[in-house]
Image (cartoon, rainbow, N blue to C red):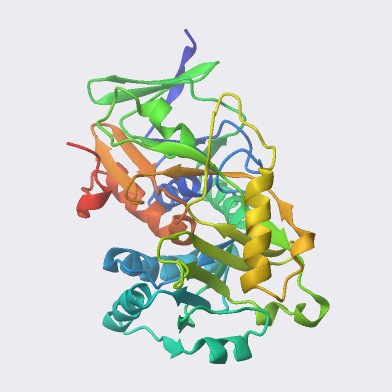
């Protein structure tokens, strides 16, 4: 058995991606002793936090996520000020597609006194000529892109600056509970704490199995594809972030598509809910040719400003919940942080604050984010 460490931390966070790092940052800001354990490094291609950019938006059909986005926006600016690093650029976001979905998003934005503009497809294409828009278009100026890998790197620096400790390249083999204490076992040491946060993405179900009651999470493999703009559209200002929320003329097709310009990489385009099974023990990074062809066809039909033949696909992990909700809750000494289904990154600093609250003894007020009873 690995030796028991001489150090007992107030909190141990397992998983050094964006969510775990934001949690450790928040705990360290509050004067708590915190250890962040990551099985890889801050820069790796195996999880869900790597890459250039992610969409930030406030428009959502559910009020709870718009409210969370408002909180996140303030905390993004706080993290930027503390680190003197640009992490979020508000360039505007466009939703388009079926009227009932667009109307729901517009209503939630209006309820929160947030600006938005309804546009016709022709007016939207005149403003962004590299894109074709579906029947109903809604523009929100409070949307844009956040820098993914830059965010993780910044959070690691802030954690250390605030007195937190980080163990990279260290796999957690097991978490054990004895009374009020949790013991986090690695190959060489066992750490003791009264609060362990498990924010390990697709590895969360493996680490907490038998320790908490949790609804099923399914790790899946996503495949975003980057495209080069045609010369006349090679202008970052011509590409807002966007979500095409199901094609209006094909009601049987509920596939959502999203995209955004990633500086240095081109315009990223992908379907939200077209995913492949994932084996964490034997993961394939091979590109699914059929998915890539389907994305090229979508680009041909809806994004004529891009060169469909310039497709460059990569893979990443979605950890999905059946309802596409988060799991942010505590049972005993274990706090589970699993912002699922590909929509979590925009909320990173707010999720870190919520998870830190839970780890320090708070309770989860949002019913849909709770662990099973």
Q: Position of residue 297 (x, y in %)?
A: 66, 62
Furthest residue in direction top, as rendered: 1
Compared to 264, does 58 lie above or below?
Answer: below
Task: Give above or below for 85 relative to 192.
Answer: below
Q: Tell me how many marks there are.
A: 0
Residue found at the very far right of the displayed protein: 231
Residue depicted at 50% across the width and 75% down the height? 143
Quadrant of the image occupied by residue 174: top left
- Percent across and percent down for residue 354 are 33, 53
- The quadrant of the image that shows the C terminus is top left
Q: Is residue 8 visible?
A: no
Instruction: Please name whichever residue, 49 or 23, is drawn nearer the observer in this view of the structure.
Output: 49
Q: Quadrant of residue 33?
A: top left
> Can residue 37 be seen at all in this image of the molecule?
yes
157 or 302, nearer to the observer = 302
Q: Percent position (x, y) of residue 286?
A: 69, 37
Residue drawn at 31 percent across, 42 percent down: 359
Please indicate whether residue 171 sits to the left or right of residue 373 in the image: right
Q: Nearer the viewer, residue 346 or 73?
A: 346
Q: Nearer the viewer, residue 137 or 117?
A: 137
Against 222, residue 186 (above or below) is: above
Farthest left residue in view: 373
Task: Kindly identify the residue that appears in the image at 52 percent across and 86 percent down.
Answer: 121
On the picture, is 271 further left or further right than 339? right
- Residue 77 pos. (x, y %): 49, 70
Above or below 269: residue 8: above
Q: Seen in the image, is 362 located left or right of residue 91?
A: left
């Amino acid at each position: 058995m690995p030796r028991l460490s001489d150090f007992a931390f107030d909190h141990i966070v397992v998983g050094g991606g964006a969510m775990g790092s934001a949690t450790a940052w928040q705990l360290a800001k509050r004067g708590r002793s915190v250890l962040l354990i990551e099985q890889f490094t801050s820069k790796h291609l195996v999880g869900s936090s790597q890459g250039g950019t992610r969409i930030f938006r406030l428009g959502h059909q559910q009020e709870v996520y718009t409210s969370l986005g408002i909180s996140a926006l303030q905390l993004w600016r706080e993290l930027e000020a503390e680190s003197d690093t640009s992490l979020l650029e508000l360039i505007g976001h466009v939703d388009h597609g079926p009227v009932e979905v667009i109307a729901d998003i517009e209503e939630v934005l209006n309820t929160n006194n947030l600006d938005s503009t309804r546009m016709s497809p022709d007016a939207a294409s005149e403003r962004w000529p590299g894109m074709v828009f579906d029947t109903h278009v809604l523009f929100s100026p409070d949307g844009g892109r956040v820098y993914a890998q830059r965010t993780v790197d910044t959070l690691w620096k802030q954690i250390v600056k605030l007195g937190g400790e980080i163990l990279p390249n260290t796999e957690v083999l097991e978490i054990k509970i004895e009374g009020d204490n949790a013991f986090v076992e690695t190959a060489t040491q066992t750490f003791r704490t009264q609060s362990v946060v498990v924010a390990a993405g697709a590895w969360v179900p493996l680490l907490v199995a038998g320790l908490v009651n949790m609804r099923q999470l399914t790790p899946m493999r996503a495949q975003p594809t980057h495209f080069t703009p045609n010369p006349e559209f090679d202008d970052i200002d011509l590409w807002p972030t966007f979500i095409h929320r199901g094609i209006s003329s094909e009601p049987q097709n509920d596939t959502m598509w999203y995209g955004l310009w990633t500086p240095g990489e081109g315009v990223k385009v992908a379907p939200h809910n077209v995913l492949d099974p994932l084996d964490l023990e034997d993961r394939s990074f091979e590109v699914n040719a059929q998915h890539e062809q389907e994305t090229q066809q979508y680009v041909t039909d809806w994004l004529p400003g891009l060169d469909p033949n310039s497709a460059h696909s990569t893979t990443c992990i979605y950890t999905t919940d059946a309802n596409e909700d988060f799991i942010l809750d505590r049972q005993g000494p274990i706090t589970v942080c699993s912002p699922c289904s590909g929509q979590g990154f925009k909320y990173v600093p707010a999720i870190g604050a919520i998870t830190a609250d839970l780890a320090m003894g708070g309770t989860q007020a949002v019913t849909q984010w709770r662990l099973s009873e």
